[in-house]
Image (cartoon, rainbow, N blue to C red):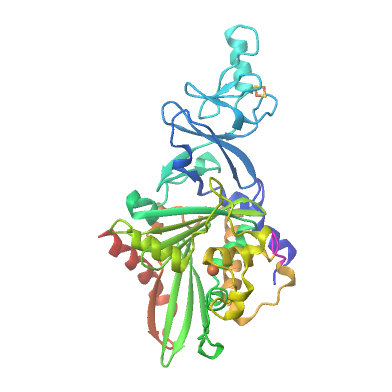
Amino acid sequence: MLSHEDNERLTCIGPGTPMGELMRRYWIPAAFSHQIAERDGPPVRVRLLGENLVLFRDSQGRLGLLDERCPHRTASLFFGRNEASGLRCVYHGIKFDVDGNCVDVPCVPATRDEQMSRIKSALKARSYPCIERGGAVWTYMGPPEFKPEFPELEWTLVPESHRFATRHIQECNWLQALEGGFDATHLTFLHGGDAEPSRRVVASHYEVMPTDFGFVVGTGREFGDTIHWNVNVMLMPFHKIISSIPMAAHVWAPIDDENTMLYSINFHPQRPLTDEDLKREKAWRGIHTENFPGSDRAIRNKANDYLIDRALQASGKSFTGIKGLGSQDCGIQESMGSISDRAVEHLLVSDTAIIKIRRLLLKTLDDHAAGKPLPGIDPASYRVRSGRCELPKGAPFGDMVDDLVRAEAAVAAE
Ligand code: FES
Ligand SMILES: [Fe+2]
């Protein structure tokens, strides 16, 4: 369990909150590039870390991410005209460039230059810098003096043909989604099929270690004299790399305290993805949920109980009766409430990794408040992968883990 106070520190991500300020020190995905492919095309709404924003691509191809509210009288810039290198509010015609500078105020009579420049500087719109990487638009919402280089996140470095990405909204707080992503125990149950309880090998060793990119979560299962370790990397502040073929990744980008945009990515470091890869991914793993056309809303969602099929559940072929890994995760994580009340939990030994992750995140918040260096600011630190290894019983986990996650990534770089 967690105190109400600590739960709030970890989960609330609005401006001025400890976790919100920590997340604002990193690059965050705002949209897919294809959503705003056209110059002077329609702007799109973006809600990130509790802030309503509007994203547009201007006549020169530059990206602008502005506060959705027009600084004049707060009308939505989503309805704006994207024309001649700027976004023009349709209420009174005031226009802004990608940096939020007010460049035209046609609703006041012509006036002296200096008076006009005073008006324009008062009408500056809040804006955040953007960058395009890996088919997505990313933004940095923190203090400009701390803006880091874009991290060397492997899936953003491969050619477009090597990557397949989708996203969908999860109607819950980012942390319970992330905790679900690092909860090894649930794989056997929530995503399990008809395995007999007696055949389930549950993990008995849990290690969570801080690193220069975030942390690693090791889950060990005993087989005779060896322990089979499954090692997963969490890159600050909300990335996971999944060890599979092709590889996979998740990004849990908070929309607000009660909603999260989950990006799911498959990628192959060396070759384009084939139809076969994608078919297998969709049929077997199902981390990509199917959305209503043109939306980020999953077809299997909270409002329809994720189309749970009780007959399928009873048949034993599916533990949940819900189809698709992504929908199973969504369903169960959303069922915990928009922000899970961790003060009423009863944690078990199988939750050891989750307990350690929370402690580490709380410590990172303390470090941030104390002005200490943060993990994941060095772009090269993200050159890691998840992996597996076998160690003799008693061999220290910490000794091999750094080599394991970096060696895997080095193979890819060759
Ligand atoms: S509210 Fe936007 S121009 Fe007046
Ligand atoms: Fe899951």
Judge whether 38 appears above or below 390 on screen.
above
Residue furthest bottom as drawn: 224
Judge whether 32 appears above or below 19 on screen.
above
Closest to the observer, 235 or 314: 314
Q: Is residue 66 left or right of residue 396?
A: right
* Magenta residues, start to end: 337-341
Judge whether 314 appears above or below 156 on screen.
below
Q: Is residue 61 left or right of residue 112?
A: left
Q: Position of residue 69 (x, y in %)?
A: 65, 32
Q: Position of residue 304 (x, y in %)?
A: 66, 60
Magenta includes 167?
no
Magenta includes 340?
yes
Q: Is residue 44 left or right of residue 334?
A: left
- Secondary structure that dominates the magenta span: loop
**Residue positioned 65% across, 11% down in the render:** 108
Can the viewer see residue 13 in this picture? yes
Q: Is residue 305 left or right of residue 33?
A: right
Can the viewer see residue 360 in this picture? no
In the rendered image, which quarter contains the N terminus? Answer: bottom right
